[in-house]
Amino acid sequence: MINGERTLMRPLRWGMVGGGRTGQVGYKHRTGALRDGTYQLVAGAFDLDAQRGREFGTNLGVASDRCYATYQDLIAGEADREDKVDVVSVATPNFTHFEITKALLQAGIHVICEKPLFFTVAECDEIRDLASKNGLIVGVTYGFTGHPLVHQMAAMVAKGLLGDIRIIDMQYTHGFNAGDDTNAGDAVKWRTNPATAGSTFVLGDIGTHLYYLSEVVLPHIKVERLLCDRKAFIPTRAPLEDHATVLMHYDNGARGRLWSSSVNAGNMGSQRYRFIGSKASVEWSDSHPDQLLYEVQGEPNRILHHGMSYLEDESLAVDRMGALHTEGLGDSWANIYLWIAQAIDARMRDDDAFLASHHYPGIEAGTEGVRWLENCVRSADAGAAWVDYK
Ligand code: NAD
C-alpha cells in the first residue's frame, strides 16, 4: 500500500511547460506530482500567454522570477542555479513535444512528457539515444495505468487464471466532438489539424491509452498484423479521424478489437477493457475503477473490489485508499508520477539494478504508442488493409 512515506533521496525540483490556467491536462499533472512530497513545483513556462502564465504560476506558489515566458527562457534561467530544476513535465500540444523534450534533455533535465509522445518512431529513437547518452529519464503520462485493478488484471494473466489469451476488446469513446467545430476552442483546433496533432486525432488522443494499458496487462503477446478503418464524420477534420476501429492479430493467435471515437454522441467518456482467456475473462472500466468483473466459465460471476486482501500482491502494493474508500484518477496519476520519480532518483544514484526491474511508462512505452499509430495510419491509408506490424 502506498502511504506517502518518502522513498527518494530528496524531493525532485519540478517544473512544467504548458498546463496553464486554460490547459485541460495541467491539473492532472499537479494532482499526480504533488501528492506524496516527491516533487516540489519550483519553475514553469505554463502558458503561451506569458503574463497569464506568470500570474498563474505565482498563484501556484512558484517564485515569480521562476515563472518564465518560454521554455527556452526556463532552460536559460535555470542553467546556473544551484537549485536548478531536476525534471520538467511537458503538457503542451503534440507538435511541441519533440522540440521541448530535446531541448530539456540537452540541458541535462529529466522529462515527463504527454502522449502521444512524438510524431514519428524516428523522433522517439533520437530522444531515446539522447536521454541515454545524457543519463536522463523520459517518462510518459499514460495516466490510467496507475489504477490498482489494472495491476490485478496483469497479475491474474501472468498467473494463468484466465488461461490462454484469446480475445482483447477495448473501447475509449466519448461524444464531445459529435457536433461540428464552428465554435471549437483551441484544444479542439490543434487536435484536428495534422500540423499540430500529428497523423491522427482520436487514435493518438485516446486510442494510445487503450493500447498502452493492454501492453501492461498482456506484456507477453505482441501485435503481428492490424487493420485500421478511420473516418472523419465531421468533414473539416479530414484527413484526421474522429472515429476509428482497429482489428489486431497477436503472435499467440489472439484477436483484438479496439474502438476509439469522439463522436459517440451522448457518451460521457467510457474506457472499457475485456480480456478473454480460454478459462475466464476480466472486464474493467475507468468509469468504475474500483471494481473488476471476473467471470470464470461455469461459475457465478464475481466482482472484485480494490484494496481487498483476496487481490494479488501486485494490486495491493499500489493501492492508496484501502478497500473502504474510493480510489480514482488522481490516485492513478499519483502512482504514475511516483514510479517515474523513483526511476529518476535511481538514475541520479546510478542504481542500474533498480532500474532494470522497475516498471514505469518511459521512452519505450511512448515509442510503442507512436509505432502503433504509424501502423494504424499505414493501414488506413491503404484503404483499411491488413498490414504486417512494423
Ligand atoms: P490545451 O490546449 O488544453 O492546453 C495546452 C496548454 O499548453 C495551454 O496552457 C497553453 O497555453 C500551453 N502551451 C502551448 N504551447 C506552449 C508552449 N510552447 N510553451 C508553454 N506553454 C504552451 O491542451 P491539453 O488538452 O491540456 O493537452 C496537452 C497535451 O496533453 C497533449 O499532448 C494531449 O494529448 C495531452 N493530454 C493527455 C491526457 C492524459 O490523460 N495523459 C489528457 C489530456 C491531454
Image (cartoon, helix red, strand yellow):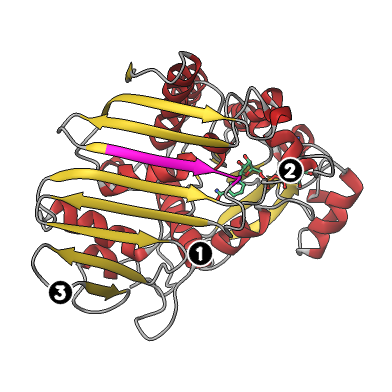
Q: Horizontal and vertical percent for residue 353?
A: 25, 43
Task: Check disc 2 and give the amino acid type.
Answer: Ala
Task: Check disc 1 and give the amino acid type.
Answer: Leu
Magenta stretch encompasses residue 262: yes
Q: Are marks 1 and 2 in contact (CB under 8 Å)?
A: no
N-term-proximal mark, 1 vs 3: 3
Q: Which residue is mark 3?
A: 300
**Rendered image: mark on residue 220:** none
Is 186 placed left or right of 226 in the picture?
right
Q: Horizontal and vertical percent for residue 85?
A: 64, 46
| Residue 299 drawn above or below residue 38 | below
Which residue is drawn at the image coordinates 20% and 57% (left, top)?
Answer: 281
Instruction: Give, as a single range, the part of the protein colored magenta.
Output: 256-263
**Rendered image: mark on residue 329:** 1
Of the two numbered discs 3 and 2 in the rendering, the one whose residue sits closer to the viewer: 3
The answer to whether the beta carbon of the residue marked 2 is less than 8 Å from any atom of ligand 1 is: yes
Q: Horizontal and vertical percent for residue 304?
A: 26, 73
Q: Which residue is mark 2?
A: 187
Which residue is drawn at the image coordinates 79% and 53% (left, top)?
Answer: 22
Of the two numbered discs 1 and 3 in the rendering, the one whose residue sits closer to the viewer: 3
Residue 139 appears in view: no
Q: CA distance from mark 3 to mark 2?
A: 45 Å
Task: Check disc 3 and give the amino acid type.
Answer: Pro
Q: Crowding near pointer 2: few (<14 within 10 Å), some, many (20+)?
A: few
Is 337 placed left or right of 94 in the picture?
left
Label 3: element kind: loop
Q: CA distance from mark 1 to mark 3?
A: 30 Å
Which residue is drawn at the image coordinates 84% and 44% (left, top)?
Answer: 183
Q: Crowding near pointer 1: few (<14 within 10 Å), some, many (20+)?
A: some
From the viewer's side, name the closer residue of 144 and 346: 144
